Amino acid sequence: MSENQKKYIKKLKKKKIIIIFIQIFIVVAFILAWEYLANKNIINTFVFSKPSKILNTLINLAIENNLFNHISTTLIEILIAFSLGILLGFIIAIILYQFPIINEIVDPFLTMINSLPKVALGPLIIIIAGANTKSIIIMALLINLIISIITIYNGFISTDDKKIKLLKSFGANKYQILFKLVIPNSYKTIISSLKLNISMSLIGVIMGEFLVSKSGIGYLIIYGTQVFNLSLVMAGILILVIISFILYKLITFIEKKLIKKF
């Protein structure tokens, strides 16, 4: 490695450290300002609570052994909805790509279902599946599946036609073209679909927990609202922020591994 390369890598690392430091500074400054404004009664602590109260709420939940039960419930539901959404979305996108006539038939229906407010289907889902975890998973699937299908399919059809013609000229069949060219060529789109799917799964699970759950982060938030415990509500929101950050970092890690592979 040349000296210029070493300097460039060192510069990138330094830039990354500075960015992380600024991000941490912004978060710490926000928390301190929030606590100060709440202590000085500049903001309404009944509505916005304050960091110290939220921390105490989290500690009490942990002591009562409720916190990790709620977190694990929500995480399991998210992972199930996420896995099903990606698997079904990938399979359906392949079917639509391989059979264009089917895509032409279902395309307007996919658009209509995607634009439909899924929470409006909540009562119907509860009646069909019952007031249980199944309803929560179905709600999350309704939100993440269509987006996964559309995103992955668009990645497939964006494959360079010249490359497809080149493989055909060498006698490749449509399945070889799909698995050797189209899917590998669409990995960036698939990663984007993963990022969208994990966020949509989180939203869908929380919406489902608002409706039917007796445990989970969504249940904590709706229960805190019902009893006017805004510290509990803010604690639930904070946990959701942390969960979404961890899941995003996990997808980013997978993305980096795929970039090195391809």
Image: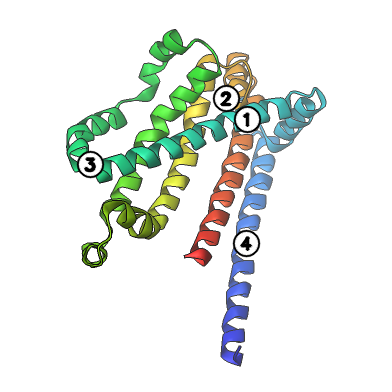
Residue at the disc numbered 4: 20
User: Viewed as shown, does residue 31 lie left or right of 104?
Assistant: right
Residue 90 placed where, x, y %? 39, 42
Choose between 38 and 167: the one closer to the eye: 167
Q: Secondary structure at mark 3?
A: loop
Query: Do the residues bearing badges 1 and 2 touch, measured as CB atoms within 8 Å?
Result: yes
Check the picture and name the quadrant holding the N terminus: bottom right
Counting residues from the N terminus, which is met first, the one under dot 3 or under dot 4? 4
User: Viewed as shown, does residue 106 lie left or right of 119?
Assistant: left
In the drawing, what numbered circle is on residue 99?
3
Estimate how packed mark 1 is, as few (under 14), some (14 to 19) or many (20 or more) residues with alpha carbons within 10 Å.
many
Choose between 174 and 198: the one closer to the eye: 174
Residue at the disc numbered 1: 236
In the drawing, what numbered circle is on residue 218?
2
Q: Amino acid at mark 3?
A: Phe
Q: Amino acid at mark 4?
A: Ile
Residue at the (54%, 61%) spot, across then down: 256
Counting residues from the N terminus, which is met first, the one under dot 1 or under dot 3? 3
Q: Quadrant of residue 139?
A: top left
State how far apart marks 3 and 4 are (Cα): 47 Å
Q: Residue furthest right?
A: 63
Q: Amino acid at mark 1?
A: Gly
Residue at the (29%, 28%) spot, across then down: 113
User: Viewed as shown, does residue 111 lie left or right of 60?
Assistant: left
Up-down relation of residue 120 to residue 94 (above or below) = above
Residue at the (79%, 24%) spot, across then down: 65
Counting residues from the N terminus, which is met first, the one under dot 4 or under dot 2? 4
Up-down relation of residue 229 to residue 188 (above or below) = above
